[in-house]
Image (cartoon, rainbow, N blue to C red):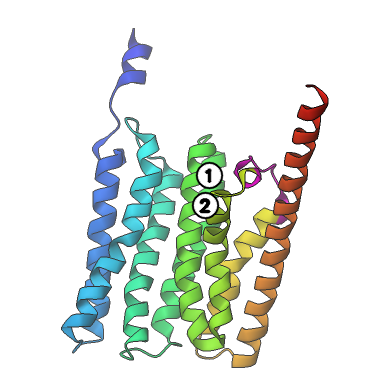
Amino acid sequence: MASSAIDTAPPPVLRRVGTALALLAAGQLLAASLILLAAAPVAAAVVAVALPLALTPSLIALWTVRARAPGGVTGADRVTLLRHLGTGALAAASVLVLSGEVEPRSWLLAALGAAAVATDAVDGPIARRTGTAGPIGARIDMEADAALILVLSVLAALVVGPWALAIGLMRYAYVAASWVRPALRRPLAFSQLRRVIGGLQGVALLPAVIPVVPHGIATVVAAGALVLLVVSFGRDVLALERAEARDRADGRRTR
């Protein structure tokens, strides 16, 4: 009886999905407001774009984290939500960069980016150590990574060239392609190579916003990351298309 009561008890308040998402949204608004105040005076139009954009990662978090309900978020989830917080702050800062209020290479951007990227090295080990790793956590982590890399690629594109946007858009292009190519909706087998290449993307984009890194080095690092990403996605697409073709051939032979 005691065990059953413990199993069905609601999670503590700060671990509840709704509370975690509300705290994330509040944190993103606060972080964006502080960034805007640091750059003041800022045009009202810039504020009107920056604040809603800072909240966009909360929508992604809502889409993925709600799968935890009615249970609570895990310790690893909370670290991943910090990555969403950093992404929201970077998104607000990117509006300032695009409007010319902030230089595209600054220590503010470097610090925000490094802090957000660092959380990617923490949530996985926490999940494995606490026995909470699973498909839901992996999805939460993957979408948080994709959002962060997209924002970093926008900032990097302003420094090394618009081609850097391909790094951030690759994941979303793959999802869009899966709408018309059934093979791309098949589950992917685990690949350590894919995992390593994915983890390198945020790290490789950071040099573009660090003031002391030579422009040429930042460009080469980002270009190398893009090449690896193309290889990784190309490898997966070929594997999925071949598996789909084999299944279709097997289906025709069994008729």
Query: Which segment is the magenta one?
Result: 183-193
For residue 221, say whether it is visible.
Answer: yes
81 or 171, nearer to the observer: 171
Residue at the location (43% across, 76% down)? 111
Looking at the rendering, which quadrant does residue 189 occupy? top right
Asked if residue 71 is positioned above or below residue 78 in the image, the reply reads above
Amino acid type at mark 2: Met
Amino acid type at mark 1: Ala
Residue at the location (67% across, 83% down)? 220
User: Would you name the residue on which mark 1 appears?
Assistant: 138
For residue 14, say whether it is visible.
Answer: no
User: Would you name the residue on which mark 2 appears?
Assistant: 142
Question: Where is residue 67 drawn, in percent x and y?
Answer: 39, 36
Q: In which quarter of the image is the C terminus?
A: top right
71 or 183, nearer to the observer: 183
Residue at the location (63% across, 40% down)? 187
Dot 2 falls on a residue whose secondary structure is helix
Looking at the rendering, which quadrant does residue 46 occupy? bottom left
188 part of magenta stretch: yes
In space, the residues marked 1 and 2 are separated at their CA atoms by 6 Å
Question: Where is residue 12 drawn, in percent x and y?
Answer: 27, 34
Asked if residue 5 is positioned above or below residue 19 in the image, the reply reads above
Asked if residue 234 is positioned above or below residue 206 in the image, the reply reads above
Q: Is residue 126 left or right of residue 97?
A: right
User: Dot 1, how many residues are within 10 Å of its Cα: few (below 14), some (14-19), or many (20+)?
Assistant: some
Q: Is residue 18 left or right of residue 113?
A: left
What count of labels does the image hold? 2
User: Dot 2, how many residues are within 10 Å of its Cα: few (below 14), some (14-19), or many (20+)?
Assistant: some
Dot 1 falls on a residue whose secondary structure is helix
Question: Where is residue 19 drawn, in percent x and y?
Answer: 24, 44
Q: Are marks 1 and 2 in contact (CB under 8 Å)?
A: yes
Q: Quadrant of the N terminus?
A: top left
